[in-house]
Image (cartoon, rainbow, N blue to C red):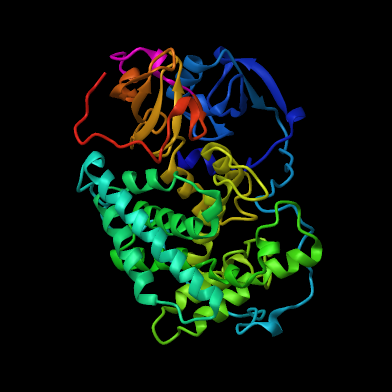
Amino acid sequence: MVDNFGSDKKSYARENLVKIPVGQVEIGMFVGELDRPWLGTPFLLQGFEVRSKSQIRSLAEYCQHVYVLKDGVPLKGPEVPVSRTMPPPPKKNVGTLLPMQRSRPGRAPQVIKPLVRARPAYEVLEPVRYEHAGARNVLDAGRVNVKGLLKSAQMGQMLDTEAAESVVDSCVGSILRNPEALLWMTKIKDMNEYTAEHCLNVCVLAIAFGRHLRMSEEELRLLGLCGLLHDVGKMRIPSEILDKPGRLTQEEFAIMKQHTVVGYELLQEQSTSLNTAALDVALNHHERPDRGGYPRGLGERELTEFSRIIAVVDTYDAITSNRCYAPALPSAEAQKIIFENRGTQFDEAIALQFIQAIGPYPPGTLVELRNGMAGIVLAGKVRFRHLPTVLLLRDANKQPMEERTVELDLTDTGTLSKEFLVKRTLPDGSFGISLRECRVQSEPVFL
């Protein structure tokens, strides 16, 4: 699917699109919109160039007509904000306030290694069902330890870096055995514990993404540590600003932005035992490739790979969580925002790979099928990302039923009725289905 997003047609205005029947779609056309929501189709995100007859057949299976790009240069659409709506950061040079300076003109750019490592892909070592109980224990223990770490930061005490590394080690172990189980656990949200849960979720998501990129175990541990500690500076931000339910004033937002500098300084105190990558990420995870970020307005070539990765993962988890100032959005909406802001707010290659890694229905997503049945996505499929494995927990009348497993990729071969395709995603708690209370059986019972 990467090629679908590699086009220079990043965005387009509605007046640049023309409606045509699917039967008139030809190879080379750029499809900008469908006659139905993208989430209910095998096409990962909005906008792709038709490059094969199989794509046309898929369009015909799901749509009556589509909107294709007319001749001409597509217009750049408005950037979708991914944080609180605030004025752009001030242009004044704040570099003198920080321990690191902006790169000077003429400085040699850093050497960028390939994003996807040249090593074999990881194999699944444990069936997802067997990993579920262990993954729940990993996340429960991790939440306790992370809250302790953040409390230490808030009180001005030394951070227990050994505890942080222990949390990361446990997460890496579970994700190497099977990433789907721990990814499910990151869907269990508690707004009252947002900062601690967010730090742990970013750690988990970053490790899972690193596994997708075939990073070494050493890299996974370091990336996870960076994710775990990236927001530690928020513990020194006044609670009336950090937990404010409404829009921040310019003065409040200026204080909020200081969490990156404060986090750097807090971690610098641990410099004797903490990898410098964690300091770099704490300082730079709100920087942007287009220099519109903070605290220093650095550009793409001045940002490390881990900082650019955490910037994407941090945004994804934030958007899919209930925050004091914004309700959670579905995973597909978060991915769409990341996709639309690739190359400006986010590193383009990292954004596209992250979307590939997460897929349209991540584990732990509540779904309703076309036939009215409902359940939870247990695992995705490598080839059929839009056809996951689903635990069915409600029948067509939304009444509780004995857990049954259905493999939606069987709809592709005709073995299973297309009435089992996903109709829509649902928020946690819909029809009485609770991610927190659901316990996956160790042995599947198929429909």
Quadrant housing residue 334: top right
Residue 222 vs 55, above or below: the answer is below
Give the quadrant of the N terminus. Answer: top left
Q: x%, y% of residue 337?
A: 61, 44
Q: x%, y% of residue 145?
A: 39, 65
Residue 363 vs 406, above or below: the answer is below
Number of labelled discs? 0
* Left/right of residue 288 with respect to residue 417 in the rendered view: right
Q: Is 416 colored magenta in this rendering?
A: yes
Depth check: give the residue in front, 58 or 249. 249
Q: Using the rendered image of the protein, determine whether residue 101 is visible from the camera's viewpoint.
A: yes
Q: x%, y% of residue 105?
A: 67, 79
Image point 49% across, 81% down: which residue? Answer: 157
The residue range painted magenta reads 413-423
* Left/right of residue 378 with respect to residue 193 in the rendered view: left
Give the quadrant of the C terminus. Answer: top left
